[in-house]
Image: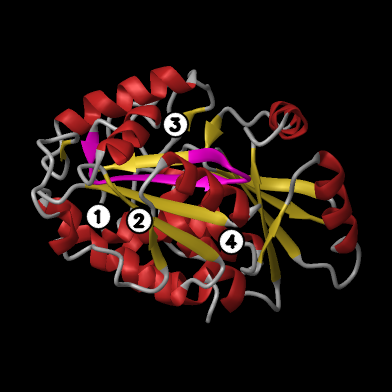
Amino acid sequence: MASAASFLATLASSAATASLNATPVISAGPGSSIIKARFLPSTSRRRRAALRAAAVSGTEKANPAPSSSPGNNNKGGRDERVVQVHSAEEFDAALQAAKNRLVVVEFAASHSVNSSRIYPCMVDLSRTCGDVDFLLVMGDESDATRALCAREGITQVPHFSFYKGAEKVHEEEGIGPDQLAGDVLYYGDNHAGVVQLHSRADVEALMAENAGEGGKLLVLDVGLKHCGPCVKVYPTVVKLSRSMADTTVFARMNGDENDACMEFLKDMEVVEVPTFLFIRDSKIVGRYVGSGRGELIGEILRYQGVRVTY
């Protein structure tokens, strides 16, 4: 099977076509394409997500009255790469077995129309993204699945949680197919033409490789794990990494991955994300803050030496 990148790069045009405001701002506001580089405790994120989900028609209350015949649900585990789990023990075992692979979990319910609508997208992704594991939890199937949903803090369905190394790295409610696909690419693909950087040493080594005569332009995508605009623009970054491979190297660093990454962001004076650093011959020659597809392409061309007229 192809990797997540091969399927999801084709979504770059639709998932990242909308040109968002790319002007740096002091603080993030509703609809902004950039967000302030600050972090909230996980409990605050969950509270914010729950409040936001309450206003989204694409979610419904979890834990309804138990379905009389959950086995008749059209999501009853008949899709070979979407594994339905029935208890916390099965759930934990699946996360442990995946090791460092991305695991995408849909928490659904038999009564939920929106769960049924989004599920075919997850099935399609599971058939194409061989480097990602997919799980299904029917919250109203049994007392065991209701207890699992309560443990994981699920209050709305459909709810998607993303795990790596048995740790939750992201979660979403009330999303559509394009956003789900973008999330899978952002959190799961390790085989795209984008170099993944985890420390200052990684950055310096990549700069050294592309320094001097014949060196390529380095575009460093700096973001955060829980940054919506970062996720939205990433399919474009993957696509550009292939089409511009002869002249440009694309790399990515998530500032909240570890202390070393955060220290690097501070040293580079990155205060808003996504920020793209343009590096030539081991020197930062420019930066672009925002998630606008057209603006990003224009800036890359400009630092490649192509004259761009706006």
* Alpha carbon distance from label 4 to label 2: 27 Å
Number of residues whose C-alpha sits closer than 10 Å to that of mark 3, classed few (under 14), some (14–19) or many (20 or more): many
Q: Position of residue 204 (x, y in %)?
A: 86, 48
Asked if labels 1 and 2 touch by Cβ distance under 8 angstroms, the answer is yes
Q: Closer to the camera: disc 2 or disc 3?
A: 2
Number of residues whose C-alpha sits closer than 10 Å to that of mark 2, classed few (under 14), some (14–19) or many (20 or more): many
Q: Closer to the camera: disc 4 or disc 3?
A: 3
Residue corresponding to mark 3: 35
Number of residues whose C-alpha sits closer than 10 Å to that of mark 4, classed few (under 14), some (14–19) or many (20 or more): many
Residue corresponding to mark 2: 180
Q: Position of residue 133 (x, y in %)?
A: 50, 61
Answer with mark 4 or mark 2, whichever residue precedes in sequence: 2
Answer with mark 4 or mark 3, whichever residue precedes in sequence: 3
Residue farthest bottom in this picture: 1
Q: Is residue 229 above or below residue 217?
A: above
Answer with mark 4 or mark 1, whichever residue precedes in sequence: 1
Q: From the image, give the main secondary structure of the stretch colored magenta.
A: strand
Q: Closer to the camera: disc 4 or disc 2?
A: 2
Q: Amino acid at mark 3?
A: Ile
Tell me where the magenta segment starts and ends, as one range: 156-169
* Alpha carbon distance from label 4 to label 1: 30 Å
Q: Closer to the camera: disc 1 or disc 3?
A: 1
Mark 1 secondary-structure assignment? loop
Is 168 in front, or is 283? 168
Residue corresponding to mark 4: 300
Answer with mark 2 or mark 3, whichever residue precedes in sequence: 3
Residue corresponding to mark 1: 176
Q: Is residue 5 above or below residue 259?
A: below
Residue 250 placement, left or right of 110:
right
